[in-house]
Image: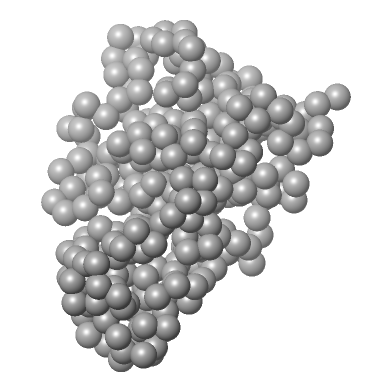
Amino acid sequence: MVKELPVVYLQTAGCSGCAVSLLNTASPTIKNVLIDQIAPGVHINLRFHPVIMAAAGKLAIQALEDTAAQKQGEYILVVDGAVPTDPDAVFGAVGERDGKPVTMLQRVTELAQDSLAVIALGTCASFGGIPAAKPNPTSAKSVKDVLDMQGISKPLINIPGCPPHPDWFVGTVAGVILNGLPTADDLDDFLRPKAFYGKLIHENCPRRAYFDEGKFAKKFGDEGCLYELGCKGPITYADCPLRRWNSGTNWVIGAGAPCNGCTQPEFPDQTAPFYEKLVDVELPTIGAYWADKEEK
């Protein structure tokens, strides 16, 4: 007997970039993830995904609501995007009920409270991201803030990134299947899996030697550390230098551009301007400086 793990993938205020990134997973491919047993005896049953599902309109919404009713306490809710909370943000809706739009806030609330666990995919879902950036006209919030606001206590895993690497999501789901939901020791203070977000980009950056030598690029294309050109690697936790992107082909600093800190809760308001140097602090301890700032 193969155990089915129902998954509901809900898109809220975002750009669909997280979905595109996930669907481009290379090993395993998205076909393997959805059709094969991702672990012996366990199959992911993707019940709702607005980008790839064949159904549309009422049929699609019916599949969503049937899953919530029939698989209560069994399904994983994946939220992709920030959640508009302003009562006047009527354009943020997912389907209708009794002829009236159902807001993204209402969908997230209803689906989260009946789920087994929630995964916030992408920086918008994890921390608010670009939709929650100033002036935030829709009062967009992170999934965690919404769950806290609604008094919902469910296991939550944040997979930030703009967009996140597909391995971060697929690896997290595989970990849940093989080992169960992560413990507090498996996640950092921002509920990110330490397996993927456990170290600063700065620690594994191939340009780290330039930083230690004090050799900084003055313009794009120069040799040297990109710190003075706005690189946020010294304050950003992710394994991009080791993981790389597009099937391991390259990554932002490998392409000569600075990291913009997209996996951090401070993105984008406090990591911008992206091409300007961070506020001056004692360079060898910049990671500790930023961690202390977050704690405060």
Q: Is residue 39 visible?
A: yes
Q: Position of residue 33 (x, y in %)?
A: 63, 32
Residue at 77 percent of width and 29 percent of height = 3
Left or right of 179 on screen, residue 93: left
Q: Nearer the viewer, residue 201 or 179?
A: 201
**What colour scheme has been applied to the protein in the rendered image?**
one colour
Judge by depth and name the residue closer to the eye, 38 or 86.
38
Which residue is depicted at the point 44% across and 72% down? 205
Establish if 140 lies above or below 290.
above
* Total tally of numbered discs in the picture: 0
Above/below status of 250 relative to 57: below
Q: Position of residue 104 (x, y in %)?
A: 34, 31
Q: Measuring 65% from the left and 55% from the top, which residue is drawn there?
A: 182
Residue at the right extreme, as displayed: 1
Please give the name of the residue rendered at 30% of the width and 51% of the height, measured from the top-left corner.
129
Instruction: Using residue 212 as the reference point, say whether residue 129 is left or right of it.
Output: left
The quarter of the rendered structure image containing the C terminus is bottom left
Nearest to the observer: residue 97 or residue 205: 205
Question: Is residue 120 among what the camera can see?
Answer: no
Q: Quadrant of the N terminus?
A: top right
* Location of residue 263 (image quadrant): bottom left
Residue 294: x and y in percent read 36, 73
Decide which of 90, 80 is in the foreground and name it.
Answer: 80
The picture places residue 84, in percent across and down from the top left corner, at 28, 39
Q: Quadrant of residue 233?
A: bottom left
Left or right of 106? Residue 135 is left
